[in-house]
Image: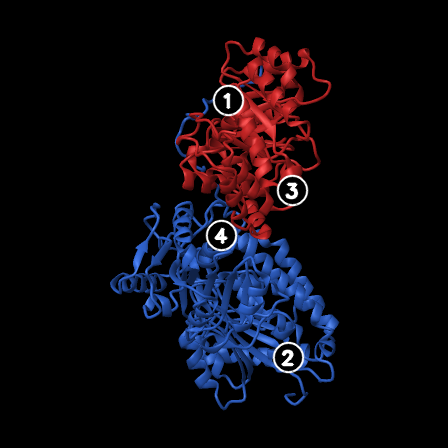
Chain colours: A red, B blue
Amino acid sequence: MSRVAETGSGTGGLVRYAPRDAVRLVTRAPAVDAVGLEERAASLGKRSIKKDSKLWALDLAIRCMDLTTLEGVDTPGKVEAMCAKAKRPDPFDATIPPVAAVCIYAQLVPVAVEQLRDSPVKIASVAGGFPAGLAPLDARLADIRLAVDSGADEIDIVLNRSMFLSGDYAGAFEELVAAREAAGDTHLKVILETGELGSYDRVRQASVLAMAAGADFIKTSTGKIGTGATLGSALCMMEAARDFYAETDRRVGVKVAGGVRASKQAIQYLVLVYETLGAEWMTPDLFRIGASSLLNDVLMQINKERTGRYQGPDYFTID
Amino acid sequence: MSDIERTTTQLPEPSAPAWEYAPAPESKEIVRLRDRYDLFVDGRSIEPKTGRYFETIDPAHEEPLAEVAEAGEEDVDLAARAAREAWETRWRDLPGKERAKYLYRIARALQERSREFAVLESMNNGKPIKESRDVDVPLAAAHFFYYAGWADKLEYAFPGRSPRPLGVAAQITPWNFPLLMCAWKLAPALATGNTAILKPASTTPLTALLLAEVMEQAELPPGVVNVITGPGGKTGGWLAAHPDIAKIAFTGSTEIGKVLRRNVAGTGKRLTLELGGKAANIIFEDAPIDQAIEGIVNGIFFNQGEVCCAGSRLFVQESVADVVVDKLKSRLSTLRVGDPLDKNTDVGAINNRDQLEKIAELVQSGIEEGAEIFQPECVLPERGFWFRPTLFTNVSQSHRIAREEIFGPVLSILTFRTPDEAVEKANNTEYGLSAGIWTDKGSRILWMAERMKAGVVWANTFNRFDPASPFGGYKESGFGREGGRHGLEPYLDLDGGAV
């Protein structure tokens, strides 16, 4: 199997790792102390963001948002409605920017392509046997190719936790490299499902593995298990991305997903990004928030910040 | 819908390169400063016999906050007699569970008025509000709660002994944790049945005086706690020398500690000293590096480094020294230095001009002795006492910055090769208050902790305090323990001979 193709994403070229080197990177990843990590995350989470700096953050939160629907009951109608919301989150307010992307299943990508034809909103498709990632490899790769061929701009795949947790780092790595190849130039996000990894050491290792395999983004969660993104797991991944940049000169993005519902949480994650990765990461190219219900809360907070008054939920559209 | 304006302001430019946090100041409204504070003796405010008052300021703005009474020898005598009488008539023989009730009341009042205490502490000391709010005040309350629990269990704390209180305790506290140090000293003293005269540091008397209000609020019998203010040398000296004093508890500089010890020798007074430090924070190559960086930052920049147990000497295993120094440098540039009352401030003002000058002098000596200085670029306020967070690399054991306590936001970085060398270098200091060990290996933590000549050894953390855990030093860092069951002992005569 040839190594990773140059994708041109990030600032530096993609570093090619042989599986052996990737395994070495993973096993030598620095230890993570859970108490210290969570303490740091909590202290950043307590930053008091007010007034203009809050409005700026809320605007950025929208621009970094992957508006998501990943249900078995998703239909073309549901996706059409969500695309409309993605393009114009607040029909009454033209100053509200569109979101970064919609995040949907591969089968519904053509619907989104139709809806988002002349819009900056990207189409992200989950693929590769989402959410368990344990379908046969050929099927997973075919799933990725289908999503790409249907017009997806971004592919969200899952790490093979079965291989990773059983210690088959080389196997998990080669699968990710295969996925990277299948996705071609399409933006690739690798979901680590941090809630299943059991420790921050594992989160750090999985981050390194995915970045070494050529992921453009590492993403916390599928949103399909009890534990979604947490400040601790996000911080752990951001520290991994920061160190990976220092070593390889390639900026890998971070996406938090699962359970991010309130503006306050979104701002906490932005603070984490800002104070861990720096201002360069404060862009939809390098930070995303995957969420379905967060958008309206952000709209509500923007409106409150501007007018000093809260409006009821019925003043915001529900798609 | 249309009657509500939805677009009144434009959003700020989204492509702004950096995110400026808007000021988020904690309101000063909650604090009602008096123009002038008298002495608190025998349960009420009395004017000092000296007739003199001195100014106490806000070090972040160099603006006066209030005038505070200067106690003379006569005032000290009044306080000592009030404390003695209160001990003999109102406190000594009160059952432990009754004393505990007062301590619980004080603890609850501190919690209820926590914001007031936190804001006042930050105003008078210069420390960031997030620290006074999240550390100083909650810990102070926790100490009263903790020792309240011991008050009626002293016989169980020392089985087979007959613990008896000593009498009047003179308690002299420093300016770095003004309220918290009062709590560390008062709580065990009161729980064990002693009465107290508190002498807060002359630059930070305001929270101690607010604490006196809490004592009144708790209806503590008059004279059980007295607060006298004045310059350390004079007022503190008279207090320590007073014949009615049975016990002296001092937290402050090693220099003054030595003077006190000389003066107390032969008097039969009990003494505990919590003095300076030059703690080693030791980073092994297998340490959780990113958390160690936070621990290093917390170790030396917490409270502007004005902490006796600050991790001011960093020992890094040579194999990871470059990584650690690089990471530290970039972390330092994210520290937010400025207005102590801003909720986002990480590093506040230095407490007083003398201290600022001492820090500057020692930093200058570091440069002259050939160490390499690093300071992040941050804008410091024009008025007030400020010092930039500072790192020194290329430091050797013989440099003054590696030996003398700086008591400021200045870290000296040294390296080591083997655990034995780390132990040897870390212990090669006249102090011995605290140490930090960072490694992923449990067995190494225990091996190191056994060999550290320091009263407190932290593993994979730093500057963490709990009322249940004893705190105190070795060597020139002092003797005696505060906190925990051990903290009861300095206030007790365990064999019933003192009464």
Q: Secondary structure at mark 3?
A: helix
- What residue sits right under mark 4 in the picture? B289
**Residue A14 visible, this angle:** yes
> How many numbered circles does the render carry?
4
- Sequence-first tag of 1 and 3: 3
Who is closer to the viewer here, B337 or B203?
A: B337
In whole angstroms, how far apart are the C-alphas of marks 3 and 4? 23 Å
Chain ID, mark 4: B
Three-letter residue code for mark 3 = Leu
- What residue sits right under mark 1 in the picture? A184
Residue B93 screen position, x and y as percent: 71, 80
Chain ID, mark 3: A
In whole angstroms, how far apart are the C-alphas of marks 1 and 2? 83 Å
Who is closer to the viewer here, A157 or A313?
A: A157
- What residue sits right under mark 3 in the picture? A165
Three-letter residue code for mark 1 = Gly
Res B87 label: 2
Question: Are marks 2 and 3 in one subunit?
Answer: no
Q: Is residue B479 above or below residue A78?
A: below
